[in-house]
Amino acid sequence: MKTLVNATRGPRSLTLAGILLVVAACSAVDERSSAPVAASAPPPTDSSSRSMSATRAPTALPSVEPAETARLVAQVLGSGNFPGYSVEAPTGWYANGGHFVVKSSGGVIGLSVWDVTQVPRDPCQWEGQLYDPGPTVDDLVQALVAQRLRNATTPTDVTLAGYPGQYLEWSVPADMVVTGDADFAGCSVEPSNGHRDFLSWLQSAGGSRYQQVAGQVDRLWVLDVDGQRLLVDATYSPDTTEVDRAELGQVAESLRFEDR
């Protein structure tokens, strides 16, 4: 089973083999962050060379019966004066390490919020391809849609948590070859630890968002939160159940930003 992780660069600590990983705060340029990977239980307390095509339809998710929920609180990944956020989550979901909301079930699944500062033009061959997309919601959305290999949907205007923005989905190519330690064959090597990352973006504290498995899907809301651009990432792997994906959608829709 898998859970959300924010693993520092150094000795490889991200694994898809069923180990619960401890979350470490991103605070340096050489740090590495992912999103959900497998966990056995909640903590006790708490490549293809194809070009991207922006024509894929958004995923249709089933509805689920209402269930008892709990409000979980987490923090934005980045360096700055950001609001906290909270979500209403059903039984089995929990806040992991202060930055992620995850479910302890089969597959990669969870939610996180990011202050994105750099985006690679190519998520696999990303060395020398990172750039600042600009400060606005539109700037970041255009950069995400233009990223190669992603099969992104056409962005649409949305409101989430009371804030305006744009929504899109993208995915990792299903034919990528990935080892059990989230190394993508043929992708650029991270010099600090020798791992081959499929890289989505960098955040303002220096941490990176890397993907974990082939076929992984990200539902992305890029929002203007009182003048701050924040990206909400709800991600899941192909082996997650339809019920878990529907719960993830409900968790995302329940998101509320808290006072600073």
Image: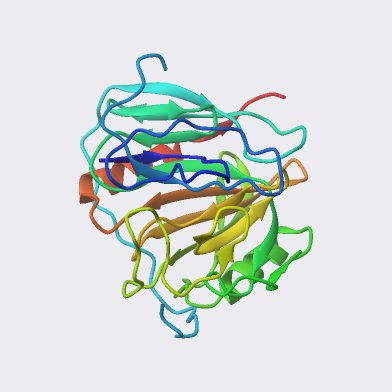
The answer, for residue 164, to whether it is visible in the render is yes
Quarter of image, res 92: top left
Quarter of image, res 20: top left
Quarter of image, res 183: bottom left
Position of residue 104 relative to residue 115, above or below, is above
The answer, for residue 249, to whether it is visible in the render is no
Q: How is the image coloured?
A: rainbow
Q: Position of residue 64 (x, y in %)?
A: 22, 41
Camera-side residue of 176 and 166:
176
Camera-side residue of 164 and 228:
228
Left or right of residue 131, residue 59 in this image? left
Position of residue 168 relative to residue 20, above or below, is below
Left or right of residue 161, residue 56 in this image? left
Position of residue 213 relative to residue 52, above or below, is above
Camera-side residue of 107 and 142:
107
Q: Quadrant of the N terminus?
A: top left
At a point 72% along the width and 24% down the height, the residue shown is: 260
Q: Position of residue 19 (x, y in %)?
A: 31, 36
Residue furthest out toward the top:
45
At a point 62% along the width and 60% down the height, the residue shown is: 191
Q: Position of residue 253 (x, y in %)?
A: 45, 41
At a point 57% along the width and 44% down the height, the residue shown is: 10
Q: How many marks?
A: 0
Residue furthest out toward the bottom:
50
Position of residue 80 relative to residue 151, above or below, is above
Q: Position of residue 149 (x, y in %)?
A: 48, 77
